[in-house]
Image (spheres, rainbow, N blue to C red):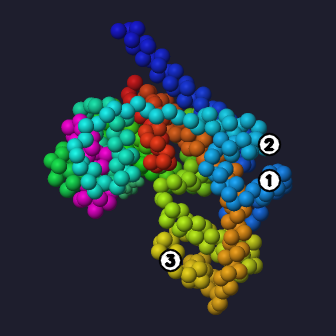
Amino acid sequence: MIASTKAAETKAVSTASAHADRFDELDQLLVAQAHFWQIRPFHSRELVWRHSHPDLCTALLELTADDVAQLESNTTALAHWLRPWLGNDGERLLALERLVPLPQRSLAVPLRFDTGIPGRKWQQVQALAAVLPAEQQPVLEWCAGKGYLGRLLAQVDGRDVVSLEWQETLCRAGQSAADEASLPVRFVQADALADSSVGWLPTNGQVVALHACGDLHTTLMRHWVASDSQRLTLSPCCYHLIGSDGYLPLSKRAAASRLRLAKLDLQLPLREVVTGGRGAGRKRHIEVLWRLAFDEWQREERGCDQYLPLPAFPKSFLAGSFADFVVWAAQTKGLAPPSSLNEAHWLQCGQARLSLVRRMELVSHLFRRPLEVWLLLDRALYLAEHGARVRIGTFCDWSVTPRNLVIDAQRA
Ligand SMILES: C[S@@+](CC[C@H](N)C(=O)[O-])C[C@H]1O[C@@H](n2cnc3c(N)ncnc32)[C@H](O)[C@@H]1O
């Protein structure tokens, strides 16, 4: 008995120390190479490394659009291409960002259980449920949406599920789907950020969260460490959706790091959209082009060579004309809208900026996943500091969702 407890402790310690080692090495590389990824490509009309690395700028400008696209889609080739400036740090980052899939069980799912669940979401939900061992304890599903994950766990394990979600329509839809299948699922319409939501963590139970954004999942983690809930299985997303100005580290190690992350830095891991398909990719291209073309116009209009960020806007705008977009953007920023606009000219200026932005982002792309793994490790270390045994890994393929990382913590 003592021997097996010791073995479990040793394993837990070695896992925690493996997380700490990986974190330290990633941290050192991210800090050392920060000038290659803590950049603001939208703000600059020239390549940001023109003084520090003119040879890199020349090489970037010599790349064709096809070269850029190929390097964007192949980080191994990108690390090789960047060797003159990064040495072998690129390859070390790629090794450190690599996480293995967590083991999965097979689930006995009745035919047509997935009716009404979007295909890709269904793949994610099944994959995350399969990471959890078959157990009977009650489950809280945090920020549940329509509660697909909770419903599946209720089905395959027969466990009681509480699904917490703040949007009434989602709660209603989720509850009626669960009721139709006579599953022991109860939706609770509540604000996850309210102090009272801690009360929904099940005693001796488990908590799951699929793609809970920024503060929503860090709040859950804080509640979990203070509770007696046994297991927390969490797939984080949208690290930048936080109430604070910049990133507030969770673990002692991250708090001791020299890395200071602004919200814009926290968006870096999300800048890789494979799930949208061609339509969404084309819309994103037009949006970025219009934003940059407007930026060119506003700098001349104001006589001020400074970036003016625009808020998010409905994608339906993109079906209209660029001239209409400029009128909206000017009004939004308190500028007089143009009485007439040379659309072709400003779009050409925007295109030139877009070409520069893509080249700057190309370099920073090598750091997207390493930064995401750094953030994941901060969470894992925080939970380990509070006595949990923590596994990290992937729960599905990157092509199913780029947000495919998972933390699985158990009370030690
Ligand atoms: C990215 S979605 C994930 C939904 C679901 N877990 C899934 O993967 O399909 C995040 C969910 O969090 C919910 N949410 C956002 N803020 C919330 C809050 N303050 N309290 C509770 N739920 C919230 C949203 O309504 C949304 O359903």
The one nearer the camera, 68 or 262, is 68
Q: Which of marks 2 and 1 is nearer the N terminus?
A: 1
x, y percentage for residue 106?
31, 34
Q: Which mark is residue 319?
A: 3
Left or right of 390: which side holds 134? left
Q: Which mark is residue 17?
A: none
- Please tell me which residue is depicted at 22% across the width and 46% down the height of the picture: 111
Q: Earlier in the sequence, mark 3 or mark 1?
A: 1
Q: Is mark 2 on a helix, strand or loop?
A: helix
Neighbor class of circle 3 (other Cα within 10 Å; few <14, some 14-19, many 20+) is few
Residue 221 image-quadrant placement: top left
Left or right of 334: which side holds 133? left
Q: Give the range drawn in magenta.
A: 148-174
Question: Which quadrant of the figure contains the C terminus?
Answer: top left
x, y percentage for residue 336?
63, 86
The one nearer the camera, 287 or 194, is 287
The one nearer the camera, 398 or 303, is 398
Q: Which mark is residue 84?
A: 2
Q: Which mark is residue 59?
A: 1
